[in-house]
Amino acid sequence: MELWLTETYGPIRGGWKAGGVLYSKQSKYQLVEIVETERWGKTLVLDGCMMTTEKDEFVYHEMLTHPAMVSHPAPKSICVVGGGDGGTVREVLRHPGVERVVLAEIDGDVIDVCRKYFPDHTSKLDDPRVDIQVGDGFEYLKNHQGEFDIILSDSTDPIGPGEVLFTQEYFALTKRALRDGGVLVTQSHSPWDPDSRLRNIRDVLLHNFSQAHWYGAVIPTYPYGWWSFFFASDKVHPLESARIERMQEITQNSKYFTPAVHDAAFAVPAFLARELGVA
């Protein structure tokens, strides 16, 4: 009998041939599972949704992190909201000059299980520059205004514990937690999903920042295979401010991100431009 990991998202369903369940535990917030899959290796599954895999995780983590890091003039203090698998912290610390990375993850069980099953993801969590705060990232930012150059919102989908991280109140909070000229990047689901609320997310961001730029990346194990992000700032533009020398330096060790990928990611297809109101 074959074992398959399946994920149902609205009217679509994905399936991945699996070797077995390595870990399964209900945390305080969600069902945390590690599933061994034939094609993608070990997979972190939260409440039945694939979050990260060994084989394609680099796309998400590189694209969440590097567009902001290569565009900000001097990113020294970074906050990662969510991201308990550690991959975003790892990518942040590829950039010289970073002095401090706060990982604000609500579910400590996610951090613990990823340390065991995803050692590459979590390889930088013990770096002395990393400050792990187990608790609500929303609450953490309330008490740390004006501290960060970049905030990377590495959240789950806008349901359950991740729902608050897509609200007007949250984006206003990130604005206050950023230093002058800071950058916020948030994942924003797939543009193919009619319920992704991309226009709403952009509108809310523009209520707090003077710029909100959509960009995308291909991630095969995520619903619809095409994922998106928003880059928000008052002073930093992801194309005009990006520094080629930093992009080239990162490219030496990256698996997905390059200067050409950076530029192309911000090209908005016509149908989506009309949906976002930028056509």
Image: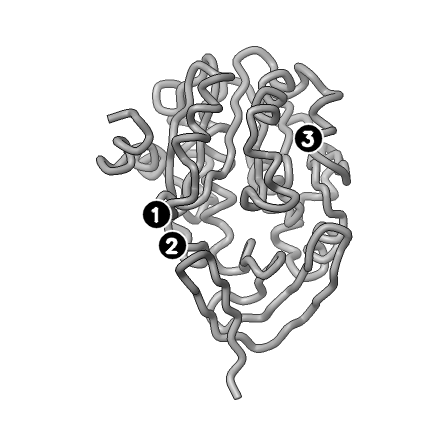
- SS at mark 3? helix
Quick one: 62 or 185, which is closer to the camera? 185
Answer with mark 3 or mark 1, whichever residue precedes in sequence. Answer: 3
Closer to the chain start, of discs 1 and 2, is: 1
Q: Is residue 211 above or below residue 50?
A: above
Tell me where residue 156 sits by quadrant: top right
**Residue that numbered label 3 is attached to:** 138
- Label 3, label 1: how far apart the Cα atoms are: 28 Å
Q: Is residue 66 visible?
A: yes
**Picture layout, residue 113 above or below residue 256:** below
Measuring 60% from the left and 68% from the top, which residue is drawn there?
35
- State the CA–CA distance, disc 3 to disc 2: 28 Å
Q: Are marks 3 and 1 in contact (CB under 8 Å)?
A: no
Left or right: 25 in relation to 89: right
- Secondary structure of the residue carrying tag 2 is helix
Amino acid at dot 3: Phe
Could you tell me which quadrant the C terminus lies in? top left
Tell me the number on the disc at residue 224: 2
Q: Quadrant of residue 277?
A: top left
Q: Position of residue 78 (x, y in %)?
A: 62, 27
Crowd class of label 1 (few under 14; some 14 to 19; many from 20; radius 10 Å): some
Q: Which mark is residue 192?
A: 1
| Furthest-bottom residue in this view | 1
The residue at the point 29 percent across, 36 percent down is: 272
Residue 243 in view here: no
